[in-house]
Image: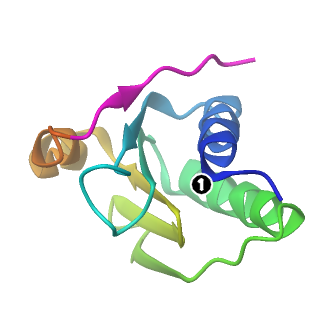
Amino acid sequence: MPDTLVLAKDFARALHSKKAENIVILDLRKVSNIADFFLVASVHSPTQAEAIVEDLRKRLKAAGKPILGTEGSKEGGWMLIDAADVIIHLFDPILRDYYDIENLWAEAPKLEWVPE
């Protein structure tokens, strides 16, 4: 089973492949026990959010990782996918600016990743 850093970077690439924008990986390992990583990304439509969630479900299943839960709604402009050690936040750009997750978790380093 891949480690959580590999999964986080794979999920970032998956988000990128579905045209999510401004993808950030926050490394929570030294600042919280909530999860190892947060992924934060902007999406521009409910259809795009749904496509991303379905793709992530398939990837998680293939990696042997369960989805512990989801929050929000694609129509509401925010969705959270809880995959235990990796939590993915999908935001409409306006709500992303409003909630400002990256600033709330400013002590968590942002990790570099390379889209394929």
Q: Crowding near pointer 1: few (<14 within 10 Å), some, many (20+)?
A: few
54 lies above or below 19: below
Residue in view at x 83 percent, y 70 percent: 64
Residue sticking out furthest to the right: 62
Q: Is residue 18 left or right of residue 28?
A: right
Front-lying residue, 100 or 94:
100
Q: Magenta span covers which residues?
A: 108-116
Q: Is residue 77 visible?
A: yes
Front-lying residue, 101 or 74:
101
Residue 94 place in picture, x, y as percent:
20, 42
Q: Amino acid at mark 1?
A: Thr
Residue in view at x 30 percent, y 32 percent: 109
Front-lying residue, 47 or 113:
113
Q: Is residue 104 left or right of residue 28?
A: left
105 lies above or below 33: above
Q: Is residue 49 left or right of residue 42?
A: right
Residue 79 place in picture, x, y as percent:
42, 64
Q: Is residue 74 visible?
A: no
Front-lying residue, 58 or 85:
85
